[in-house]
Image (cartoon, rainbow, N blue to C red):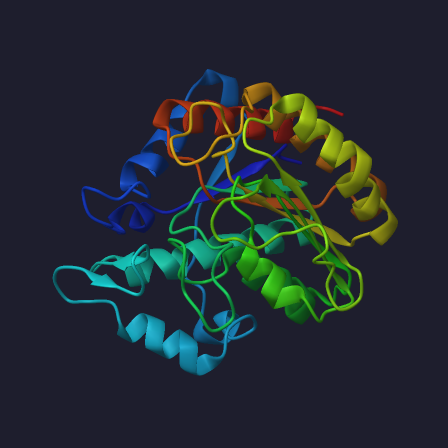
Amino acid sequence: MTPALLITHEACARHDTGHWHPESPARLAAVLKALDNADFAGLAWREAPRATAAQLALAHPAAFVERALAAVPETGYVGLDGDTILSPGSGEAALRAAGAVIAGVDAVMAGEVASAFCAVRPPGHHAEPEVAMGFCVFNNVGVGALHARAAHGLKRIAVVDFDVHHGNGSQALFWDDGEAFFASSHQSPLDPGSGASEERGAHGQIVNAPLPPGAGGGHFRAAWSGALLPALDRFRPELILVSAGFDAHREDPLANLELVEADYHWITLELRRLARRHCGGRLVSTLEGGYHLDALGASAAAHVQALMEDL
């Protein structure tokens, strides 16, 4: 079995958000450059397919999917909100980004690989079922999770999120779903303003660990070891999906946490150990935030290195 799979597509680089926007094509280039060296010779690369309208409709009403794609301009830029910008290449990029997570789920369910990393953009974890926001058009990880149910018959799906911003879209999508687990560590206060520890979901299956500005790796690891990982263990997932944002890094310009590459390596190994315990090692992660290019590339490399290591 190939140790891990990288899924990406060149269309994701054609999602142009404007020269001023932090969620730029250079982010994806930095990640791919960091993974294109001898240390990752065993990493298989695969092209992301397009998500279909029916697959997107697992997480979003069909009317919303139609509106979002219809908003893509033929020229210039359109803002779905002040942060979420579309250009002529954005529709194809959004379809490939969601399609990558679907392909990752299919690959781990087929036993081709134990884990997959989707190097894609636009990100997805802020996209609520009927609202595109926070740089996100479709909720890529949510589409992948619900595809795992629809196509593979799984029930208990876990989504975990270590982006510095709370995954409000994923939380909203799974709030009423007793067989979907969501766990997040994130800085608070910070946009989007959700993710208080009291937000537990309709069935107590959501666990949030807000971290104060200035918190570093010790605080991050304590939150995961003390609350989030034990809750995930008790949930006994059949599949783990990861919103892998790297903007909690100490160099990131959009937030104020103090993580380093070793922290991302550590949490990835911990999640893999739980995946091996409960779901045959099946784990799919997808790129969310990370806006300091060097730190983003190094952090993504640490994450993928941990996906490839023997446990």
Q: Is residue 235 above or below residue 61?
A: above
Residue furthest left in the image: 75
Q: Is residue 216 above or below residue 228?
A: above
Instruction: Report if residue 108 is visible in the image.
Output: yes
Residue furthest bottom in the image: 63
Residue furthest top in the image: 38
Give residue 251's position: percent from left, percent from top: 43, 23
Number of marks present in the image shown: 0
Give residue 245's position: percent from left, percent from top: 51, 39
Residue furthest right in the image: 234
**Quarter where residue 187 is shown:** top right
Q: Quadrant of the N terminus?
A: top right
| Nearer-the-camera pick, 294 or 194 | 194
Q: Is residue 25 above or below residue 56?
A: above
Instruction: Report if residue 147 is visible in the image.
Output: no
Q: Residue at x 36, y 38 (%)?
A: 28
Question: With 307 as the anchor, is 131 left or right in this view?
Answer: left
Q: Quadrant of the C terminus?
A: top right
Question: With 7 as the anchor, is 234 left or right in this view?
Answer: right
Give residue 261's position: percent from left, percent from top: 55, 21
Give residue 106's position: percent from left, percent from top: 61, 56
Q: Residue at x 28, y 41 (%)?
A: 25
| Nearer-the-camera pick, 76 or 149 | 76
Q: Residue at x 66, y 65 (%)?
A: 174
Q: Residue at x 54, y 61 (%)?
A: 169
| Nearer-the-camera pick, 212 or 222 | 212
